[in-house]
Image: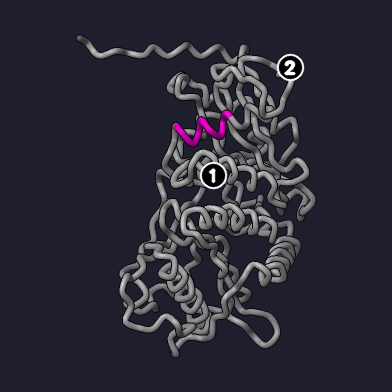
């Protein structure tokens, strides 16, 4: 007998599809659908119930409170009527696609208007199409309608991270890919040196950072970043970029990453990581620091943010950074993680990686991501092009 074939229902025309906030029951349906369908990074290694709990923690994080996160559905019905709680009966075929928007504070400098730290932009996450409607342009309809909503909300720009290459979202609403260099350190599995020591004697002291240590450092980071933007003169820059943008590296944003990863670690490993980063101290203020998250899905330690207070090009800076990388390697090994990853590393950090001992890493590689987590940005109504915009602090802490 010939194999059975499943005919997909036709996607309704865009005029018959509606972008609207999801009800509680629809949110639950979309969570379960994405967990079951995707498996992999979205669902594994959590059960459905644990995955739903993770999403509750995500929604209740400080960075997402007070309406800072919105769950959207692309629906065949313009407005839900009747009960909207978890017990509501949802027609599964009514929801064609879904996504989330996360409102985040940003810093902007433009040649026309100078410094501005009073606006918020949106990150777009969890773009998902019902399997029945894939391959028919549902994602394009979703993103085009979302672009219209964002433009109406007057956000200066939106950002997302593509797992579908550089062109997918550029062709579906105008989100264009930016630099995606990555430093990857392959952790040595059997070090000869005792990891109980904070760092090799030739390196400066690196102190561990815990969650409670980071509030002050994040506040200092934000202060320095704002001062840098505020001091930028309204003249043509040598690089030709006349728009500078950055998401604010706040303590709340860091904790959003920590909360979800801590929950996953508790479920999967039975414990939560206490060390969140490392700092090279100084008599007055720390010289440099970084903080990270434990990615148990991909078995790696990912640096969320690196801060170098002053880079004078001297060897002392390289040694400071080598000490930080050594601390990251030690933490990765403690959790049996195979890699340490840093997004868009500065040259000084790449050079510092070369100073690590063979006991620390087997190798270090710098390359551009071309298929996943590609940072993409769209200015309001497409009024500014990628060539005009310098997207800074484009590190993992911004990811959504």
Across and down, in percent, residue 269 comes to 47, 59
Q: Eyeballing the image, is 386 above or below 203?
A: above
Between 89 and 325, the one lying in front of the other is: 89
Tell which of 310 and 124 is nearer to you: 124
Tell me which numbered mark, 2 or 1, is placed earlier along the sequence: 1
Mark 1: few/some/many CA within 10 Å (<14, 14-19, 20+) = some
Q: Residue at x 61, y 79 (%)?
A: 287
- Residue range (magenta): 29-36
Q: Is residue 343 above or below residue 69?
A: below
Q: Is residue 33 covered in magenta?
A: yes
x and y, in percent, of residue 134 in the image: 45, 23
The quadrant of the image that shows the N terminus is top left
Q: Which mark is residue 50?
A: 1
**Which residue does the numbered mark 2 point to in the structure image?**
81
Q: Secondary structure at mark 1?
A: helix
The quadrant holding residue 235 is bottom right
Residue at horizontal 44 percent and vertical 47 percent from the top: 45
Residue at 63% over, 47% down: 58
Q: Nearer the viewer, mark 2 or mark 1?
A: 1
Residue 62 location in percent, x, y?
72, 52
Q: How many marks?
A: 2
């Amino acid at each position: 007998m010939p194999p059975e074939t499943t005919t997909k229902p036709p996607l309704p025309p865009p005029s018959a599809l509606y972008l609207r906030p999801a009800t509680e029951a629809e949110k639950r349906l979309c969570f379960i659908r994405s967990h079951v369908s995707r498996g992999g990074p979205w669902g594994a290694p959590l059960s459905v119930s644990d995955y739903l709990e993770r999403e509750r923690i995500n929604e209740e994080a400080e960075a997402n409170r007070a309406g800072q996160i919105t769950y959207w559905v692309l629906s065949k019905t313009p407005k839900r009527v009747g009960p909207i709680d978890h017990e509501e009966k949802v027609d599964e075929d009514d929801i064609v696609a879904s996504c989330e928007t996360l409102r985040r504070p940003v810093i902007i400098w433009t040649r026309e208007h100078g410094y501005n730290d009073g606006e918020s932009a949106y990150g777009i996450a969890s773009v998902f199409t019902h399997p029945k409607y894939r391959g028919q342009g549902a994602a394009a309809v979703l993103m085009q309608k979302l672009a219209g909503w964002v433009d109406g909300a007057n956000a200066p720009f939106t950002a997302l991270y593509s797992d579908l290459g550089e062109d997918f979202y550029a062709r579906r609403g105008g989100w264009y890919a930016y630099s995606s260099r990555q430093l990857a350190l392959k952790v040595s599995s059997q070090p000869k040196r005792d990891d109980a020591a904070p760092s090799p004697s030739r390196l400066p002291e690196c102190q561990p950072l815990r969650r409670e240590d980071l509030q002050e450092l994040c506040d200092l980071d934000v202060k320095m970043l704002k001062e840098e933007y505020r001091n930028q003169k309204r003249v043509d820059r040598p690089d030709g970029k006349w728009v500078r943008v950055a998401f604010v590296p706040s303590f709340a944003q860091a904790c959003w990453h920590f909360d979800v990863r801590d929950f996953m670690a508790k479920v999967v490993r039975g414990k939560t990581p206490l060390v969140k980063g490392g700092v090279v101290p100084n008599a007055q203020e720390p010289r440099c620091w970084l903080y990270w998250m434990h990615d148990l899905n991909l078995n790696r330690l990912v640096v969320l943010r690196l801060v170098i207070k002053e880079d004078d090009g001297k060897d002392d800076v390289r040694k400071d950074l080598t000490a930080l990388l050594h601390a990251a390697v030690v933490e990765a090994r403690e959790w049996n993680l195979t890699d340490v990853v840093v997004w868009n590393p500065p040259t000084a950090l790449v050079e510092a990686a070369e100073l690590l001992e063979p006991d620390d890493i087997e190798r270090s590689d710098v390359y551009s991501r071309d298929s996943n987590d590609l940072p993409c940005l769209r200015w309001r109504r497409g009024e500014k092009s990628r060539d005009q915009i310098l997207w800074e602090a484009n590190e993992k802490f911004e990811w959504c």
